[in-house]
Every structure is written in structure tokens, then in C-alpha cells.
Image (cartoon, rainbow, N blue to C red):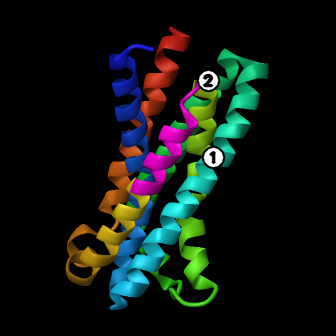
Amino acid sequence: MDATYLIGEFITIGTMAFAFSMDSFSLGLGMGMLRLTFRRMALLSILSGAFHVIMPTLGILLGKILSDYLGDVALIFSGFLLLFIGGMMVKSFFQAGHAGYAIPPYGLGLFLFPIMVSLDSVSAGLSLGIFGARVLITIILFGLISTLLTLAGLMLGRKFHHILGTFSLAVGGAILIAFGIKIIAPLIT
């Protein structure tokens, strides 16, 4: 395998992991307004990273199965799936009152937050599984980037929530839309 190809795959998966972790960052901004202890913020960040490993792994496994049976149809589906999810993230940006921080980060809420922000990673894994991405690189990048962005969101939320707000969702959505177009365009032309 060519080193340039590996670097390109690393950058692509890292960028997708960043985009899918923007909701963790955005909701972390809201949660940061609750003045959580650093220990609670670290726990939320680690749980978010763990679920961003589990969810894409499930998606990758399903994506590989679909790819084996459906070929290019599955690839086109994965591109449209990224367009849809990216569009939903951008739509969330334009809707008033993003209330993700209404879940208290204690008890059951401690797990609801990371599950909620990692569910869309199943579809990322599905797309990457269809595309044939390497599982280990994918789950490491998704977990690490999600953990770091969640922690950054929680810490910045204490000071800058009124400035950044849900803008990060629009950025993540735009990145996913770009990848969806990149996947679909060569296949339908």
C-alpha cells in the first residue's frame, strides 16, 4: 500500500471524525454552562470518546457486509447518507434553541449525553465500511478526536458559549456534505 494513500486515508478519516465530533463539542459548550468539576468533564469526555469508538465500529461492520453485497449502490448510499446527516446538522444550526445541555450529566444523564452525540457515528462507520476504510485507524481517530473535542467544548462552554453556540454544528455539517459530494460525484458522472 502506497504511503500517500495511507496519509490521504488518515486525513480523510480524521476530518470525518472531526465533523462527527462537532456535536460533542457543541453540546459540551452547553454542558459547560453547568459549571461541572474537571473530574465530571473528564468522565463525560472519556465516555463520549468510548461511544465514538463503539458506534462507528458497529457501522463499519454493517457497511462491509452491505458493500460485499451491493457494490457501487452501497457506495452511492453512503454518500447520500453523509449528505443527509450533514444537512440535518446544518438545519440544527438554523433552528432556534439547541437544548442538548438540558440533560443533567449525572446518573443516567451521564450516559445519555455520550450516546446521543455518538449515534450519528454509526452512519459514519457505515459509510466508511462501505468505502473500505481501515477499522483500527477509524476507531482510534473517532475516539480520540471525540474525547478531545468534548473536553474542549465543556471547558470553553464555561466562558464562551454565548459566542460559539451551535455554530460548530454548521461547520461539522458542511464538512460531511463535502465528503458526501466527494463520494457521489465520481460514481454518477
* 37 w.r.t. 95: above or below: below
Which residue occupies 66% across, 43% down? 59
Q: Earlier in the sequence, mark 1 or mark 2?
A: 1
Label 2: how many residues lie within 10 Å, few (<14), some (14-19) or many (20+)? many
Which residue occupies 59% across, 25% down? 132
Residue situated in front as seen by the camera: 169 or 134: 134
Which residue occupies 28% across, 77% down? 155
Q: Position of residue 80 (x, y in %)?
A: 57, 32
Describe the element under mark 2 as helix, strand or loop.
Answer: helix
Q: Which mark is residue 74?
A: none
Of the residues shown, which amino acid type is indicated by label 2?
Leu
View extreme (right): residue = 69
Residue situated in front as seen by the camera: 171 or 141: 141
Which residues make up the magenta segment?
Answer: 132-144
Q: To which residue does mark 2 refer?
A: 75
Q: To which residue does mark 1 refer?
A: 57
Residue 99 in view: no
Of the residues shown, which amino acid type is indicated by label 1?
Thr
Direction from residue 66 to residue 105 in the image, left or right: left
Residue 140 in view: yes
Label 1: how many residues lie within 10 Å, few (<14), some (14-19) or many (20+)? many
Residue situated in front as seen by the camera: 188 or 160: 160
- In this rendering, the count of numbered labels is 2
Q: Position of residue 17 (x, y in %)?
A: 43, 47
Quarter of the image for residue 25 reads bottom left
Direction from residue 37 to residue 176 in the image, left or right: right
Magenta part, dominant SS: helix
Quarter of the image for residue 93 reads bottom left
Q: Position of residue 173 (x, y in %)?
A: 41, 47
* 147 w.r.t. 181: above or below: below
Residue 99 among magenta residues: no
